[in-house]
Image: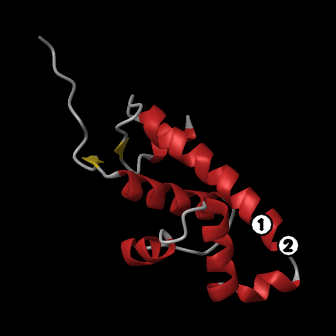
Amino acid sequence: MKTEQIPLQSAVLEDGDIQCQAYNMAFQRLGLKWHWDAGTFAELAQTADEKERIRVYIRTCQAHLLKVYDANALSDLIYSEKCRCQEDLCRCHGTGAAPQWAWDEECLAA
């Protein structure tokens, strides 16, 4: 029986970890110089609604953007891109409900 090797940079992560990574990928793709570490994500995760979670972050850490952008529009944009990134992470590693993560630029560029 042939077994598939998982690259060394890959690791099975919890749902919160994959979501945090997807947010960070979304920020990068959107040209935002933001990064959520595990602690920031855990604190924000206390807000159940993901779009509201993004709005909370914007209001508390990126309030200057509210002078130019509507918080709802910005959170919608970030959330949509986060969902695409999360799908990409799962697609790249052939997983569904139990995603595996790797920062695999080659795969994500495909």
Q: Quadrant of residue 55?
A: bottom right
Q: Position of residue 10 (x, y in %)?
A: 28, 46
Q: Residue furthest top?
A: 1
Secondary structure beneath disc 2? loop
Q: Are marks 2 and 1 in contact (CB under 8 Å)?
A: yes
Would you call the spot at circle 1 few (<14 residues within 10 Å), some (14-19), or many (20 or more)?
Answer: some
Query: In the picture provided, is 6 more to the left or to the right than 1?
Result: right
Q: Residue 1, position in %: x, y?
A: 11, 11
Mark 2 vs mark 1, CA separation in Å: 6 Å
**In the image, which disc is placed on residue 70?**
2
- Left or right, 31 with reference to 37: right
The quadrant of the rendering that contains the C terminus is top right
Extreme-left residue of the structure: 1
Q: Which mark is residue 16?
A: none
Point 68% across, 66% down: residue: 31
Quadrant housing residue 53:
bottom right
Type of amino acid under label 1: Leu
Q: Residue at x 41, y 31 (%)?
A: 96
Q: How is the image coloured?
A: secondary structure
Q: Is residue 55 above or below residue 85?
A: below
- Count the marks: 2
Which residue position holds label 1?
74
Residue at 47% from the left image edge and 32% from the top image edge: 91
* Side (left or right) of 53 relative to 63: left
Q: Amino acid at mark 2?
A: Asp
Q: Secondary structure at mark 1?
A: helix
Q: In the depicted view, which residue is nearer to us: 64 or 53?
A: 53
Where residue 47 sits in the image (x, y, percent)?
Answer: 54, 70
Image spot of residue 26 (x, y percent): 60, 58
